[in-house]
Image (cartoon, rainbow, N blue to C red):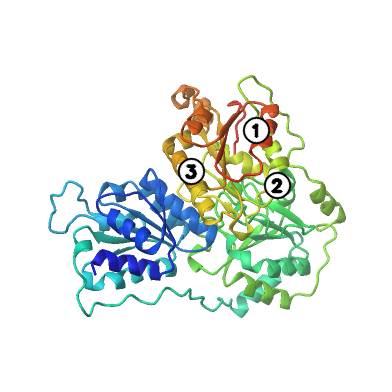
């Protein structure tokens, strides 16, 4: 057996059935072996950075370790931004990277892959000998699961053809997810938080993605202490149906949420990455003390100051605090009038929609989306000014891994590849992705990937003819915004030329007509939405 075959066997032993990537000299025969001998599905991207994003999207949608492969040198180098996103998100992911022969430092594609991998992915496992190849694969998958985060598994091209000697180190048993015992807060911390909640007049419990498994416990604590509930955008929908759930808190909070949170005197966060966006730079709950509960002590106050921090599991902490509290009624805070307002709230109330020949008001388009899109979907929102509209105005529940927002590194060009990965990983529900024109054009070739894969992805391109965030920021400084504007392009025609059905939207009538044709989403589709550039989003 060759070392390359041993690597393929070890990868499959980890339960891998899907791999993303782009072929090159240093990984092509490994991919061929995985496909032909093991039946692994290979999703071929058009760009290595996009391939890693697809694997990341797949992992976020499925909860499994994503796998991707690229070739040596430039293949790995192109993937740096995507690896950084995955590292900052803590996505379990293994990137199998080919490498040039160690004995040929003058190879045209040679570059220092280990320091590059450590600077981006943050972890590097080299395959140094055929005898240890299977073991090294297992070590890479184990590291990806335990960190969690991306790991670069480095495989020199010449090593792959070498024979595996007798007595080679066997592959470890496939990774078994280890769930450590929940972190228990100290009795003093629990008593202090209980005292703060008892003394507060207008408390808020704010849950993040890390509290998804604790939703019932946090909800019961809120009912016991008379608090209202809110979530971060990545935990949207966690308390859906509760009469005192204010929805998403943060820079994209809706008017009612902003009004209520402005009066809060205590905000307790559970499993939330509290940062300047969550607090809207201090404008969201300016009069409140803030207490953060998190399993990671390093996260407490790291990105936004807190008055107190508690190291503990969200569910365990919420139950322990509730046990110390007598039931509290706060009729001036959790009032029938507030519950009625929450129930009747319409995110589009009070908006004065703009009419124009150049396109549709993006808020008017999102209003059509709110009415027409299927409730059961995976929503992907890319990075850019355009992302503010669906995040602010469209209800996109994040439970069951149904909301993917790869914003960790602030990189544009993420919407389409993450949508492809999510669509491949969860074909049982359609993916609705929002992307900008400038963002899409950084990776236009992945429309071809979408067409070939055939995943149920509806990509909505909100096209304002440039980089909207930069245009908005240039004007107050007296800079000519033409630097960030570009000629109009027929992106629907481009999509169709690459095999993806597409429609152009310029007003409400064409939006309704497009949805009439594209729904239900059963395969790839693009709506090229020309939006009015003068309608800008200040918070995104």
Quarter in which the C terminus is drawn = top right
Instruction: Tally the marks.
Output: 3
| Residue 118 in view (yes/no) | no
Q: Nearer the observer, disc 2 or disc 3?
A: 3
- Residue at screen point 55% across, 35% down: 501
Tag 3 residue? 450
Tag 1 residue? 514
Q: Residues within 10 Å of mark 3 (few under 14, many from 20)?
A: many
Classify 251 as above or below 154: above
> What's the distance in space between the residues labelled 2 and 3, CA to CA?
39 Å
Q: Give the quadrant of residue 166.
A: bottom left
Say whether residue 201 is left or right of residue 120.
right
Quarter in which the N terminus is drawn = bottom left
Q: Residue furthest front?
A: 36
Q: Position of residue 485 (x, y in %)?
A: 48, 25
> What's the distance in space between the residues labelled 3 and 1, CA to CA?
19 Å
User: Callout 1: helix, strand or loop?
Assistant: helix
Q: Position of residue 187 (x, y in %)?
A: 62, 80
| Residue 418 in view (yes/no) | yes
Classify 229 as above or below 354: below
- Which one is in front, 463 or 307? 463
| Label ID, residue 258 | 2
- Which one is in front, 94 or 279? 94
* First reached walking from the N terminus: tag 3 or tag 1: 3
User: Callout 3: helix, strand or loop?
Assistant: helix
Q: Residues within 10 Å of mark 1 (few under 14, many from 20)?
A: some
> What's the distance in space between the residues labelled 2 and 1, CA to CA?
34 Å
């Amino acid at each position: 057996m060759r070392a390359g075959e041993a690597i393929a066997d070890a990868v499959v032993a980890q339960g891998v059935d899907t791999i993303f990537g782009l072929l090159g000299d240093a990984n092509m025969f490994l991919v061929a072996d995985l496909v032909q001998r093991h039946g692994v599905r290979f999703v071929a991207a058009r760009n290595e950075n996009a391939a890693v994003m697809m694997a990341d999207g797949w992992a976020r949608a499925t909860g499994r370790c994503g796998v991707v492969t690229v070739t040596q040198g430039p293949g790995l180098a192109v993937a740096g931004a995507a690896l950084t996103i995955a590292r900052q998100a803590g996505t379990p992911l293994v990137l199998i990277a080919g490498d040039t022969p160690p004995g040929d430092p003058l190879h045209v594609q040679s570059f220092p892959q280990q320091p590059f991998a450590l600077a981006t992915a943050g972890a590097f496992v080299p395959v140094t000998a055929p005898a240890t190849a299977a073991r090294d694969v297992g070590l890479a998958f184990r590291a990806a699961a335990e960190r969690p985060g991306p790991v670069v598994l480095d495989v020199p091209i010449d090593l792959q053809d070498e024979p595996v000697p007798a007595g080679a180190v066997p592959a470890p048993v496939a990774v078994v997810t280890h769930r450590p015992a929940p972190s228990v807060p100290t009795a003093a911390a629990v008593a202090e938080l209980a005292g703060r909640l008892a003394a507060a007049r207008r408390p808020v419990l704010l849950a993040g993605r890390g509290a998804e498994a604790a939703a019932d416990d946090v909800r019961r604590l809120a009912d016991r202490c008379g608090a209202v509930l809110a979530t971060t955008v990545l935990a949207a929908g966690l308390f859906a149906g509760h009469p005192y759930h204010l929805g998403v808190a943060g820079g994209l909070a809706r008017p009612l949420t902003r009004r209520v949170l402005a009066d809060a005197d205590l905000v307790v966060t559970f499993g939330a990455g509290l940062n300047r966006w969550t607090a809207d730079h201090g404008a969201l709950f300016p009069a409140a003390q803030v207490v953060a509960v998190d399993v990671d002590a390093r996260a407490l106050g790291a990105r936004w100051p807190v008055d107190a921090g508690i190291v503990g599991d969200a569910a365990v902490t919420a139950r322990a605090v509730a046990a110390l509290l007598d039931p509290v009624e706060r009729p001036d805070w959790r009032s029938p009038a507030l519950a009625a307002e929450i129930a009747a709230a319409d995110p589009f109330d009070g908006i004065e929609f703009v009419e124009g020949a150049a396109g549709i008001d993006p808020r008017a388009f999102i209003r059509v989306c709110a009415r027409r899109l299927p409730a059961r979907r995976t929503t992907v929102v890319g990075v850019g000014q355009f992302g503010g509209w669906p995040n602010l105005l469209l209800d996109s529940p994040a439970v069951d891994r149904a909301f993917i927002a790869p914003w960790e590194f602030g990189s544009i060009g993420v919407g389409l590849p993450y949508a492809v990965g999510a669509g491949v990983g969860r074909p049982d529900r359609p993916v609705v992705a929002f992307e900008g024109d400038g963002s899409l054009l950084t990776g236009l070739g992945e429309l071809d990937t979408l067409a070939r894969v055939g995943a149920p992805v509806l990509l909505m391109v909100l096209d304002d003819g440039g980089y909207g965030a930069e245009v908005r920021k240039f004007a107050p400084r007296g800079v000519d915004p033409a630097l960030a504007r570009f000629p109009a392009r027929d992106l629907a025609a481009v999509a169709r030329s690459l095999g993806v059905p597409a429609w152009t939207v310029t007003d409400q009538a064409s939006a309704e007509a497009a949805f009439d044709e594209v729904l239900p989403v059963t395969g790839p589709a693009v709506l090229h939405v020309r939006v009015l550039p003068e309608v800008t989003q200040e918070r995104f």
